Image: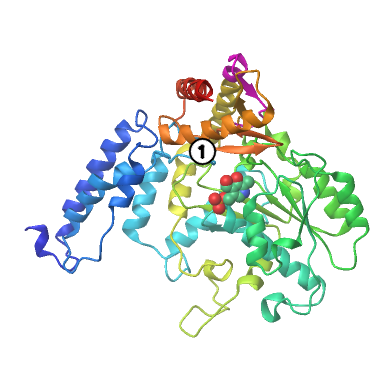
């Protein structure tokens, strides 16, 4: 049957589509270790996917062939071993297979009635993650689209608690009768927490950043002072377990002490840094997170499950029920004895993200993840050594995890010139596409900050990264 005969979905299309996708995916993944991270023609290829809605469709197999033929060039090889921009995990084989199944089964992880499988695996996976990270068993949680939404959920629980401390159910009557919130963090705070404060109606300006230096390190004394000066309403503290420039940590145990002393809420963003807890070599960085009231972790970063996936853990799970309660006659009743996840998080209909999470934890277990993290810690040190050995590279920060913050510095240039040079180098790296990393501002220096959290990455990939950076850096420097 020709594709063109299908103007509506047909069962007969499935066999060809699945065979085509399995074949193409296998070919892609077979070559992914060697694949350029980004084609020099990626933008053109993306823009070429344009035009008006077709009056008559081409059928599933033709559409999928077109997607493969025209789409791959526009994609970034984020699942490959040399993509170090942002903090991007790969996809383990177990997670990939389970994610395919999640789409095949098309489960709605809203409620027990919509999918006992998805709900049970989500609750079980969250329990396994609490065990992986050695968090209290009584904590509750929910899967989210990522750390941004996990920060939103954790801070929504904080807001519910904060308002209840003042005799108000904020989910019911809103913020109007409440004072301005006081949220404190160091300069390590991630932009997504600021976004979450905006979404929660507390406003971005509710955040006070207390840093003792240009790098953003927490000013503990200023925080103590601010808490001592406090009025009646409790404060919210945001601790950062793994910041994006160099993977550094706030002193979480100190924050937990201060939260305890002043009756404040402690939210910790451990989007990727919480994985330090999986290895005895790095676990000390996270000491105290078990005393937080809410905690964010990402799935699509160091857990290496596909986008999108994050986790919000909350010490008092009943807050989520009050913050996100909703009901309607056609939905499960509030007294339904089964767990219904749509009533303890922001989304109602939800993808069954738990299938991939469960599968990867089942496949590789605690030991597998410890080994993965330790491999990345070693790769971080390997890259740091290669940078330290290179006469034209300058490392700017210690490497507690696997983010290495450095710049190209051929010598004899002032700070402004170095910043211009490294900005240009960052742009050139992305355009070149053999390897991929982004720039940031570290203190006052423009720096590269490759983050290694993909299970496929090897020392040879990082050696190539160093040589591409030096080659492009030298070429830009020779022209400036
Ligand atoms: C520390 C931290 N928090 C939050 C986020 C936001 O995560 P997501 O993009 O998964 O929403 C990130 C992303 O890099 C992060 O590194």
Residue lying at 74% horizontally and 46% vertically, measured from the top left: 187
Asked whether the viewer can see residue 176, the reply is: yes
Q: How is the image coloured?
A: rainbow
Q: Residue at x 68, y 67 (%)?
A: 319
Q: Residue at x 45, y 20 (%)?
A: 460
Magenta stretch in the rendered image = 385-403
Q: Quadrant of the C terminus?
A: top right
Left or right, 100 with reference to 140:
left
Please say if 297 is above or below 159: above
Q: How many marks?
A: 1
Can residue 129 be seen?
Answer: no
User: Percent x, y for residue 418?
Assistant: 63, 28
Q: Residue furthest front?
A: 480
Residue 161 image position (x, y, % from top left): 75, 67
- Classify 363 as above or below 137: above
Residue tagged by mark 1?
85
Dividing the image into 4 quarters, which one contains the N terminus? bottom left
In reply to whether residue 394 is colored magenta, the answer given is yes
Mark 1 residue element: loop
Q: At which x and y percent is residue 392?
A: 59, 17
Residues 56 and 379: in front is 56
For ligand 1, tell me if the residue under mark 1 lies within 8 Å. no
Q: Position of residue 229 (x, y in %)?
A: 93, 59
Residue 281: name its quadrant: top right
Q: Is residue 204 magenta?
A: no
Of the pair 361 and 456, the residue shown nearer to us: 456
Query: Mark 1 packing: few (<14 Cα in 10 Å), some, or many (20+)?
Result: some
**Residue that lies at the very extreme toward the bottom in this rendered image:** 329
């Amino acid at each position: 049957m020709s594709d063109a005969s299908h103007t509506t979905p047909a069962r007969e299309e499935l066999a060809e589509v699945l065979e085509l996708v399995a074949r193409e995916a296998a070919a892609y993944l077979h070559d992914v270790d060697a694949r350029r991270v980004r084609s020099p023609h990626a933008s053109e290829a993306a823009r070429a996917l344009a035009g008006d809605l077709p009056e008559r469709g081409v059928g599933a197999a033709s559409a999928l062939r077109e997607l493969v033929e025209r789409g791959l060039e526009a994609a970034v090889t984020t699942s490959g071993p040399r993509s170090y921009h942002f903090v991007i995990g790969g996809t383990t084989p177990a997670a990939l297979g389970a994610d395919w199944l999640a789409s095949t089964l098309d489960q709605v992880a809203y409620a027990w009635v919509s999918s006992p499988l998805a709900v049970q695996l989500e609750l079980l996976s969250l329990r396994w993650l609490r065990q992986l990270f050695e968090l209290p068993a009584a904590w509750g949680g929910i899967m989210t689209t990522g750390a941004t939404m996990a920060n939103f959920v954790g801070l929504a629980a904080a807001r519910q608690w904060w308002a209840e401390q003042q005799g108000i159910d904020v989910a019911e009557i809103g913020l109007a009768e409440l004072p301005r919130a006081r949220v404190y963090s160091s300069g390590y705070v991630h932009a997504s927490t600021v976004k979450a404060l905006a979404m929660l109606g507390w406003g971005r300006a509710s955040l006070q950043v207390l840093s003792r230096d240009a790098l953003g390190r927490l000013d503990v004394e200023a925080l103590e002072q601010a808490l001592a000066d406090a009025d009646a309403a409790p404060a919210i503290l945001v601790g950062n377990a793994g910041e994006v420039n160099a993977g550094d940590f706030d002193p979480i145990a100190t924050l937990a002490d201060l939260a305890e002393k002043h009756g404040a809420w402690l939210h910790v963003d451990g989007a990727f840094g919480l994985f330090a807890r999986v290895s005895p070599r790095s676990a000390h960085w996270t000491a105290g997170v078990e005393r937080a009231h809410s905690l964010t972790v990402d799935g699509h970063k160091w857990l290496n499950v596909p986008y999108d996936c994050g986790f919000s853990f909350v010490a008092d799970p009943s807050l989520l029920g009050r913050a996100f309660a909703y009901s309607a006659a056609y939905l499960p009743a509030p007294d339904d004895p089964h767990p219904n996840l749509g009533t303890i998080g922001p989304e109602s209909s939800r993808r069954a993200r738990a299938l991939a999470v469960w599968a990867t934890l089942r496949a590789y277990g605690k030991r597998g993840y410890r080994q993965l993290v330790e491999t990345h810690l070693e790769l971080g040190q390997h890259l740091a050594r290669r940078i330290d050995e290179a006469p034209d590279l300058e490392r700017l920060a210690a490497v507690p995890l696997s983010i290495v913050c450095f710049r190209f510095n051929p010598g004899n240039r002032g700070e402004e010139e170095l910043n211009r040079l490294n900005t240009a180098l960052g742009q050139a790296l992305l355009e070149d596409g053999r390897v991929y990393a982004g720039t940031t501002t570290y203190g006052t220096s423009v720096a590269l900050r490759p983050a290694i959290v993909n299970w496929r990455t090897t020392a040879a990939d990082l050696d190539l990264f160093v040589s591409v950076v030096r080659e492009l850096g030298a070429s830009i420097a020779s022209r400036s």
